[in-house]
Amino acid sequence: MDDNGELTSLDTGRWTRAEDYIQSLLRLRRARRAHLPPPRTEPETPRFSLSTLPFLALLAGLGVMAVAIAIAAWPGNQPPPVVYAAVQAERGVAPPGWFEDAKREMHHPPARD
């Protein structure tokens, strides 16, 4: 609506010419290009000092630590184990009927005071 309260006139030939379509497509293309991210500043292949070298240094450090732990844990540096003298087995003598007494006590324990 315009200021007088009347409907605005329609532009009848507005989207019928090919130039209008092409100009619209060009404006759309310019708008898309304005919102594209900037071109890459990084190289396609990463630098050796920033990618591979730290990985190799870490791998070498872990390898050195593994060898150091294996050397420290080698059992050759341990003192020999203490050998205790074997105790001679003594043959004991039990009174006759001890096994039956033990069975009776297992099934019927004596009363506790």
Image (cartoon, rainbow, N blue to C red):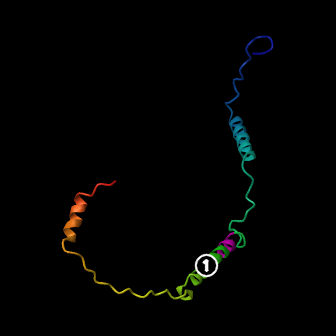
* Residue, far top: 5
Assign a secondary structure to mark 1. Answer: helix
Q: Residues within 10 Å of mark 1 (few under 14, many from 20)?
A: few
Q: Position of residue 1 (x, y in %)?
A: 75, 16
Residue 53 vs 42, above or below: the answer is below
Task: Say which of 3 and 109 sits in front.
Answer: 109
The stretch in magenta equals 51-56
Amino acid at the residue labelled 1:
Gly
Q: Position of residue 10 (x, y in %)?
A: 71, 20
> To which quarter of the image does residue 61 belong?
bottom right
> To which quarter of the image does residue 29 belong?
top right
* Residue, far front: 113
Residue at (65% x, 75% y) in the render: 56
Residue at (71% x, 37% y) in the render: 24
Residue that label 1 marks? 63
Q: Position of residue 15 (x, y in %)?
A: 68, 30
